[in-house]
Image: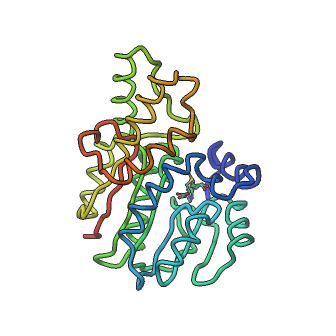
Amino acid sequence: MSQKSNTDLHWNSRAISESDGAKVNIADTVQRDLELQYIFNHLSPSMRLLEVGCGNGYVTDQLRARVAHVDAFDYAENMVSRGKEVYGETNNRFFVDSVLDPKNARGPYDAALCVRVLINLRDLSEQIRSIRNIHNLLKPGGVLILIEGYKEGFAAISDFRQKIGIEPLKPAAINYYSGLSELMPTIQELFAVADTFHTGLFDFLTRIILPAVAGPGQASGPGQFHAQIEPVVRAYDGREFAQYARLHGFVLTKR
Ligand SMILES: C[S@@+](CC[C@H](N)C(=O)[O-])C[C@H]1O[C@@H](n2cnc3c(N)ncnc32)[C@H](O)[C@@H]1O
């Protein structure tokens, strides 16, 4: 495996520094639950699932209750240890591996899940390589549920914020965001798009309306506002807000 990046080191430490298991992989649990609502709708009980970048196993635990088996891996050793310790291995396996060069996966799988993992890689070429690696681990017709962040949504939010006098939205320094338009040719070469998801309405509300109403310093969330809008964003797909989505999700079928 190649040398660890600062982002890799960040995740390995976070596995130890954050005590709340729900917040190890993402502080915003409302966003996380929105993602999970979408993911769970696309799982079936007979699936053998590969979870790429499983973090501390908080999601693995919920996945294994919904499918036949989960092979869950992460590049951060401390994440994998914490997953084994807290959740154990039942109809799942936790192991250390890198999506850039997976060696310990036992494919082919019926399905794979990759959520906010590619944004932790160094650049577009590593992201493309990872999508190819996941594709190779799937059965013909296998499904990839891919949810990642892309720079177009950040730009649209920042443009809107500028119009109302709020500073641009800065992505976290540990992340690398490609354009969706840059990854889409690879996605379409390897997969057929079966379904889509985005966080546009959630992002418009939390990154534009909340700072406009409460002031930018008050809008770091997740707080009361996130909890109040949760039923709204769960009930409506917010299609008019797709351009403001920081995250886009796809259910992809291997060609
Ligand atoms: C933002 S967390 C997301 C975790 C999980 N997918 C979730 O939805 O909660 C990103 C995770 O990706 C892992 N990761 C980063 N680079 C990786 C790589 N090359 N191979 C496997 N996992 C990686 C990190 O260690 C971290 O646990």
- Against 57, residue 35 (above or below) is above
Q: Please state the horizontal and vertical placement of residue 121, each as a whole percent of the image.
A: 52, 48
Q: Please state the horizontal and vertical placement of residue 215, each as a whole percent of the image.
A: 52, 21
Q: How many marks?
A: 0
Q: Residue furthest top?
A: 165
- Left or right, 236 with reference to 122: left
According to the image, what is the colour scheme of the structure? Answer: rainbow
- Left or right, 103 with reference to 199: right
Q: Quadrant of residue 91?
A: bottom right
Q: Please state the horizontal and vertical placement of residue 128, each as a whole percent of the image.
A: 39, 53
Q: Quadrant of residue 143?
A: bottom left
Image quadrant occupied by the C terminus: bottom left
- Left or right, 28 with reference to 155: right
Q: Please state the horizontal and vertical placement of residue 46, each as a whole percent of the image.
A: 41, 85
Residue sitting at x 47%, y 18%: 167
Image quadrant occupied by the N terminus: bottom right
65 or 227, nearer to the observer? 227
147 or 238, nearer to the observer? 238
208 or 69, nearer to the observer? 208
Residue sitting at x 28%, y 76%: 141
Residue sitting at x 30%, y 50%: 237
